[in-house]
Structure formats: C-alpha cells, structure tokens
Image (tube, grey):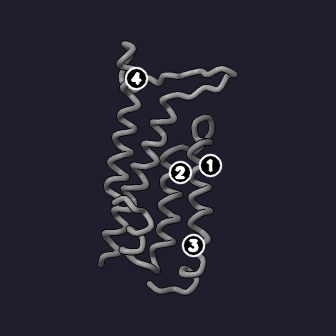
Amino acid sequence: MNALILRVCGPLVLPLALGFSLYLLWRGHNEPGGGFVGGLMAAAGFVIYALPRGHDELLRLLRLPPGAIAALGLFMALGSGLPGLLVGQPFLTHQWKVWDGGFAIGTALMFDIGVYLAVLGSVLVFLLYYLDD
C-alpha cells in the first residue's frame, strides 16, 4: 500500500500513538486501561507507520524482532509472579515496595509492562507476516 496520507501522517501519528499507549499503560493500574489496551494502541501506531513503508522499514525502526519483544513481555509478566513465591504467598500475588516520601511501586506494574510488550510483539508478528505477502 502506498497511500500518500499514510506516508505523510505515519511519522506524525506514531509518536502520538506511543505516548497515548504509555498513558494508557500507566493509567490502567487504577482505572480502565493497562498493558493490553496500551499494547494494542502502540501496535496501531506501528501499523499506520508500516503499511506504506513495508516490512524492512518497520524492522529497522524496532531494532528488535517482534517475536523477541513478545517473549520479553511474556517473561516479564510471568516473572512478576515470582516475588510472591519468594515470600511464601501464591504465584502472582503482587508485592509492593514503599519508598521514603510515600512513593510505592509494585510487581503489578511489571506485570502490566510485560502484557504491554507481549501484546505489542504479538500484533507486530502478525503484521509482519501479512506485510510479507
């Protein structure tokens, strides 16, 4: 596909889509959103960028194969369940670390980032498969 509107708007839409996907990822911990929706939004931005440019341009932009992105996400999501096991709780029981000043971070964020990467990588694998045709 070599549509002029996609060639011109793709580089503009991609950073907006990625920024919005990160907003959805961060927001999803306490409100609707999260890793799945954020990963889909990021993939949509890459789709708009890649349709007029093709397979090779998308791979150059990513710098990692999409399958590796999906695998990294899967390992992160599964790895987020291990801290619960280490303290004698069930797998995927989320743990929290509270820092001075009240800032708290937990394994739920690691799980969401893993889902984000797994969804992004999986959708891009399918996209690249169809761009090859």
User: What x and y, as percent, mark residue 40?
Assistant: 49, 56
Residues at marks 3 and 1, CA–CA distance in whole angstroms = 19 Å
Q: Earlier in the sequence, mark 4 or mark 2?
A: 2
Quadrant holding the N terminus: bottom left
Snapshot quadrant of residue 62: bottom left
Tell me the element at label 1.
helix
Residues at marks 1 and 2, CA–CA distance in whole angstroms = 8 Å
Identify the mark at residue 11; answer none if there is no mark: 3
Q: Residue furthest top?
A: 88
* Residue under pointer 2: 38
With respect to residue 114, does 46 lie above or below? below
**Callout 1 amino acid:** Tyr
The residue depicted at 35 percent of the width and 35 percent of the height is: 78
Determine crowd level at label 3: few under 14, some 14-19, many 20+ residues with C-alpha closer than 10 A: some
* Residue under pointer 4: 83
Residue 97 located left or right of residue 81:
right
Q: Earlier in the sequence, mark 4 or mark 3?
A: 3
Determine crowd level at label 1: few under 14, some 14-19, many 20+ residues with C-alpha closer than 10 A: some
The residue depicted at 47 percent of the width and 24 percent of the height is: 94
Q: Earlier in the sequence, mark 3 or mark 2?
A: 3
Residue 32 located left or right of residue 120:
right
Tell me the element at label 2.
helix
